[in-house]
Amino acid sequence: MAKAQPDGYTWLVSISSLIILSQLYSKLPYDFDRDLAPVAMMAKIPYLVVVHPTLPAKSLAELVQLARARPGQLNYGSSGTGAQTQLLTEMFKHSAKVDIVHVPYKGVVPAVTDLVGGQVQIMFAVAQASGPHVQSGKLRALAITSAKRSSFFPDVPTIAEAGYPELDVLGWNAVHVPAKTPRAIIYKINSDIMKVLDLRDVKERMFAAGFEPAQMSVEEFDAYTKMEARRYAKVIKESNIRVD
């Protein structure tokens, strides 16, 4: 896609992991900032802070207290080394000043499966993967990373309400195009996407699937990705995360 004709007809449905990859790998066959132009964020994907029910923590504050009392004894699952689930949990570790052990998996599903089974105790997991287990009582949700409480989990406080506003990290789906695409075309695509996201049936289907429709201008989305890149670069350096 980065090498395609910049005529507006070739799009990349991008995900938040692309920002992380650009910070993790020193050598990629493309440069995220140089070769790709941001167009529009389409959907935000909140994370739930979930624990196994046997863990005696009914709130994020209680989890922090427990982790501080048992340094290095609690563990958390992630969808892999360098994945957003790991980076978000590492941010939490730095903010809360706790020592919990990372257990990487090859994807979200096996990580959540082992969390339900009690092999790991804590996870920042996307709501689509962890939500059904919370609703069935197999997992306990302590916080959600969205700005507002979820209608699916009205009793679960936001991460800001739980005392950690700096952890308002979301997964997202968006659109990028080749970098040299004319600005007029980029603005046109953004405008059309925003109109679609405002349709009632589209909103209903997105909410039902666990997504939050996003409304951002081209400039707002560009600024957001740059902020995320700085945040991920910081935690990758602080946590000494390496993948190659």
Image (spheres, rainbow, N blue to C red):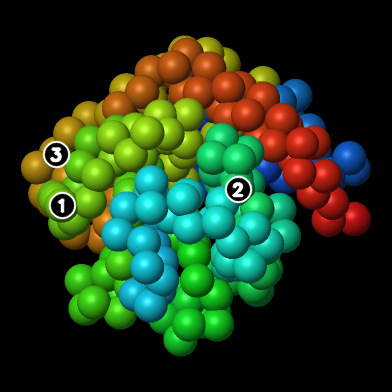
The image quadrant where one finds the C terminus is: bottom right
Q: Nearer the viewer, residue 55 or 15?
A: 55
Q: Quick check: 146 left or right of 80?
A: left
Q: Residue at x 67, y 25 (%)?
A: 230
The tag earlier along the polypeptide, 1 or 2, is: 2
Q: Is residue 197 left or right of residue 94?
A: left
**Label 2 belongs to which residue?**
98
Q: Secondary structure at mark 2?
A: loop
Q: Indicate the secondary structure of the residue bearing disc 3.
A: loop
Question: Residue 62 at what x, y percent from top left?
Answer: 38, 52
- Residue at the extreme bottom of the image, as rendered: 117
In the rendered view, would you say 98 is above or below 75? above
Amino acid type assigned to the residue bearing label 1 in the image: Asp
Determine the CA span between mark 1 and mark 3.
28 Å
Q: CB atoms at circles 1 and 2 under 8 Å apart?
A: no
Q: Splitting the image into 4 quarters, where does residue 176 fall? A: top right
Residue 117 in view in this figure: yes
Q: Residue 199 — which label?
A: 3
**Where's residue 70, x and y in %?**
59, 61
Nearer the observer: mark 1 or 2; the answer is 2
Q: Which residue is mark 1?
A: 155
Q: Residue at x 21, y 78 (%)?
A: 136
The one nearer the camera, 175 or 53, is: 53
* Rendered-image quadrant of the N terminus: top right
Q: Amino acid at mark 2?
A: Val
